[in-house]
Image (cartoon, helix red, strand yellow):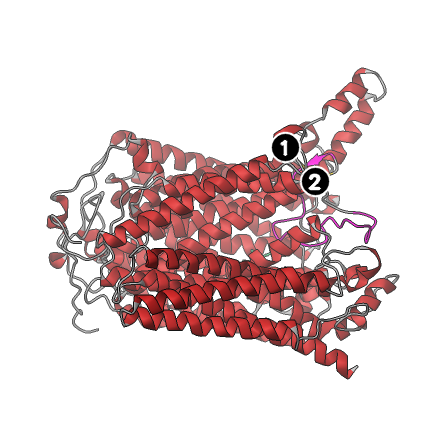
Amino acid sequence: MAHGDVKHDYHLVNPSPWPLLGSIGALFLAVGGVVLMRGVGEGFFLAKGQWTLFLIGAAIMTITCIGWWGDVIKESRAGDHTPVVDIGLRYGMILFIASEVMFFVAWFWVFFEMVIFHDNRSSWIIAGDPEAMAAWANWPPPHVETFDPFQLPLMNTLILLLSGTTVTWAHHALQQDDRKGATLGLLLTVLLGLAFTYVQFGVEYPEAGFAFGNAGEVASANVYGASFFMATGFHGAHVIIGTIFLAVCLLRLISGGFSAKKHFGLEAAAWYWHFVDVVWLFLFTFVYVTPYLTMQGN
Amino acid sequence: MSHHDAAHAGGAHDAHGDHRPSIYDPRRWLFSTNHKDIGTMYLVFAIIAGLIGGAMSGLIRWELKEPGITFLPHLVHVPHAILEQVRLGVMNADQLWAWKVDAAKHFYDTLVTYHGLIMIFFMVMPAMIGGFGNWFVPLMIGAPDMAFPRMNNISFWLLPVSFTLAMISFLVPGAGDHAGFGGGWTLYAPLSTNWGGGATPFSYHDGPAMDFLILSLHIAGASSILGAINFITTIFNMRAPGMTLHRMPLFVWSMLVTVWLLVLSLPVLAGALTMLLTDRNFHTNFFNPAGGGDPVMYQHLFWFFGHPEVYILILPGFGMVSQIVSTFSRKPVFGYLGMAYAMVSIGLIGFVVWAHHMYTVGMGLDLEAYFIAATMVIAVPTGIKIFSWIATMWGGSIDFKVPMLWAIGFIFLFTVGGVTGVVLANSGVDTSFHDTYYVVAHFHYVLSLGAVFAIFGGFFYWIPKMSGYRYNGFLAGLQFWIMFIGVNIVFFPQHFLGAQGMPRRHVDYNEAYQYWNNISTIGYLITAVGVLVFLVTLVEMFLVKRKAGANPWGEGANTLEWSLSSPPPFHQFNELPVIKPEAGH
Ligand code: HEM
Ligand SMILES: [Cu+2]
């Protein structure tokens, strides 16, 4: 977009209110979150369980996202995304996904640590805590009824894998300037994403044979339930985020956005979707199948 | 090293057509998308946070001056209910004092905790990465700005938000009536947990303070991850023509390694913090043995982040010291490639040594042996760096300007900290030294006398460039000598205290430790005078306004930033500089 004296192709962004607004939103979300979970005082704003501050934060965040990414789309249309800027956006997205991968490492860590070392732990001598010994003695712990991975989870695996192919279809169609094909592919991907979410949260979770928190008698088995729900739950949240991302791309496509040459938003959404897909394959293997087979072997 | 020749820089083009908004225009700062303005905001933020964190350490040292709990009880906040009891005569003066002493114990613990967190997350990181990184990475690689200028701004603004949350956390109830979280900057479970559901009969920190702290660190982490993505993209994608990776100044190399560590380690901390949050609020048992979890798992997750983090705190300092030493020795850095790849290998190995912080958890001999060996290996690239700095100075015509004093101080004192690190790496020795003042001495030698020295060095090296003014050499030199003496008096005796077995993070101590504690507190006073002289130097510099030319350091300063005016134009490099390979390289 070189203009005036500027003789390079980088994008010098104009001053923007969104970062400051988003930060204020984060402050409200955080304070509101603590109010919601624990309460820090009395009354409408501060008492435990009050949603006010949290919702204000969420509203500010939503406005920020719409305003910020809206600006990005405008700038892209204005030609600010030169080839070198486009490469930068790609680096940015890949690195963001890399950081997300490391976030999941933390959740997998719990599983691997317990699979490999629960036995070591149960042979430690901790005077007077037989409860802890019992909890560590087996993995998956007693009282845990794992899912049969070859039923709903397998179906969800197939749903996600299929959605991986439909999003690739959409991408390739757009590259050939086949906008109808692209729209159809994206629509299918979004629907498959919704199907996955429904099956996971709507059908599978209510049937779990273990609890998220230590509700009474299954306390000793809790780390399994907690890590199962947090790992698969965070994955599920990422599926929802990815679905929204893809849906926004679908809307942009229908309203005439993207071209056969330039459609990084769609590519980024597709990358994100594949990342979500790969995380699921790991979850399926190590959280569903392996513990199940171990139990069968017991 | 940048092998560039000032004549090719195109600084002359830049001054022309440059629209610099007024510094009194709030929008310039609030909505900024300019890497230099954002860098300046980071530096101001870091100075403010540093003063607050420094004040906390003053309270710590003052309490530790004498054995007994004598000073902090005067400062604790007495809740209304207690005052009422005193008024009604239910509580007499002695009982009130006893209550205050009890409260002072927790207050001391919170001071240690927030001091550490503030210095790490709100002083060193913002100064080095946010401040100097933002200012000089684009300048040194010949780029007009960062890759994502708007995202750069949210990286900054999330920090005051995070800091606000930390301060809220400091003031709201943490443990029972007592305000703040007192479990140390590492936030170890079970000190940081609060198990509901009756699985455990007690909880250490049941108040909302810990929850605020968790969210504070989540947000600081988000800020750093976004910043790191920005730096990697900038360095990979926006180097000027001819600025190959192997011609990049070592400061840029150091930032590149640092931000990779951030991207890969911070999300793991985010996971651990989230587990703490659900353990506290949603009855999970990640770190509760009675529910099948384990507090030791928290330590693993934390240190998988924590050890890379300590290198995050020092690597930019390595980079700055390299620039300074080369400038004032008027020689290119000895073994440039070795220096760059030493940092890369420190970064890589830094990911596989974390459990040297956990030798006493009972992980078993095989694991200990592995972590000892891996930790010792890091001393090799660290040694490469130290010897290369010395070799750079060797035979150079050294100019002992203030930045060089800080750099030499850094090399000297960081080495002391590195050596005690190697001592601690031996699990047999560490079984005695762990959680004693020996560890405190170790990490203050690498941080307060390492990282902070590097920050001061970088500050005086670049302040003429950033502000356009020269500092008063006498005042700045005075500050260096006062602080050099002060911090050594604070921290060197702590080696002795640790060797004598004085545990860290305790408000009171046996009288046997009085002598060296007294000395250490005197050292604090000297250091505080040094900080005052620093503030005076700053004020004097901006009042007197001695103009600094484009390059106040002469031929030794040959990286790109010195080819620009001081301060540089609002948007530099409208025409990209072309870097030519220098003869002989
Ligand atoms: C030669 C390199 C180094 C080695 C071998 C080393 C080794 C160690 C070991 C074994 C410990 C654990 C001591 C204990 O808790 O018992 C430790 C603690 C620590 N080190 Fe280092 N270290 C080195 C360099 C550094 C550097 C460069 C920094 C930061 C700039 C650093 C910062 C710290 C901190 C902050 C702690 C204490 C953490 C805590 O428990 O709060 N170290 N170091
Ligand atoms: Cu370490």
Magenta region includes residue B109: no
Name the quarter where the N terminus of chain B is drawn: bottom left
B156 left or right of A7 in image: right
Residue at 37 percent across and 61 percent down: it is: A92
Label 1 in the same subunit as label 2? no
Q: Look at mark 2 in the image and give the residue it sits on.
A: B207
What amino acid is found at the position of numbered circle 1 in the picture? Leu
User: Mark 2 belongs to which subunit?
Assistant: B
Residue B253 visible in the shown view: no
Q: Distance between the residues labelled 1 and 2?
A: 14 Å
Q: What stretch is highlighted in magenta?
A: B177-202
Tell me the residue at 81%/52% (across/down): B200
Q: For the stretch drawn in magenta, what is the main secondary structure?
A: loop
Residue nearest the observer in this picture, B478 or A127: A127
Q: Position of residue B74 (x, y in %)?
A: 68, 27
- Image-based side of B9 in relation to B451, left or right: left
Residue type at mark 2 is Gly
Q: Do the residues labelled 1 and 2 touch (CB within 8 Å)?
A: no
The residue indicated by pointer 1 is A46
Q: Position of residue A82 (x, y in %)?
A: 22, 59
